[in-house]
Image: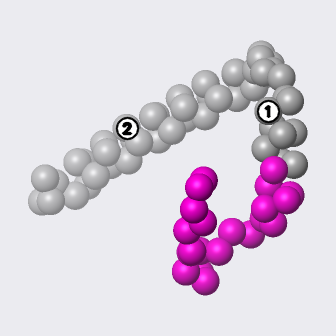
Amino acid sequence: MAEETKLPPEEAPEVEPVEEHKLIDELQKMEYEELLPVEKKLISWSIIIGVVSLGFLVWISYTFFPGGH
């Protein structure tokens, strides 16, 4: 960043520039961690529940409110 851009007051960064550099350094030092099997199961169950719920709501919409389609 050769030149500083001024942000409007409502978009001012919440992290001090010195602390931001420390945060960036710490994030770059972190190693990649594989997802645990239980995390993979939770993610897949969440997606499945979301898709089934969406299908159920679409079915209810078409069944009980046919005029809007």
* Nearer to me, 49 or 8: 8
Does the magenta-highlighted stretch encompass residue 14?
yes
Depth check: 66 or 50 in front?
A: 50
Q: CA distance from mark 1 to mark 2?
A: 41 Å
- Residue labelled with disc 1: 28
Q: Residues within 10 Å of mark 2 (few under 14, many from 20)?
A: few
Question: Going 57% across and 62% down the picture, which residue do you hit?
Answer: 3
Report the number of discs: 2
Which residue is the extreme one toward the bottom? 9
Colouring chosen for the image of the structure: one colour
Q: What residue type is disc 1 on?
A: Gln
Local secondary structure at mark 1:
helix
Q: With 38 as the anchor, is 55 left or right in this view?
A: left
Which mark sits nearer the N-terminus, 1 or 2?
1
Task: From this view, report whether residue 47 is shown above or below residue 35.
Answer: below
Q: Are marks 1 and 2 in contact (CB under 8 Å)?
A: no
* Viewer-nearest of discs 1 and 2: 1
State whether the magenta stretch is mostly helix, strand or loop.
loop
What residue sits right under mark 2 in the picture? Answer: 55
Q: Nearer the viewer, residue 3 or 52?
A: 3
Specify whether 31 is left or right of 52: right
Residue drawn at 87 percent across, 49 percent down:
22
Tell me the residue at 45%/34% (across/down): 51
Between residues 35 and 62, which one lies in front from this camera angle? 35
56 left or right of 8 in image? left
Where is residue 64 drawn, in percent x and y? 26, 55
Q: Residue at x 47, y 41 (%)?
A: 53
Q: Is residue 3 magenta?
A: yes
Q: Which residues are magenta?
A: 1-21
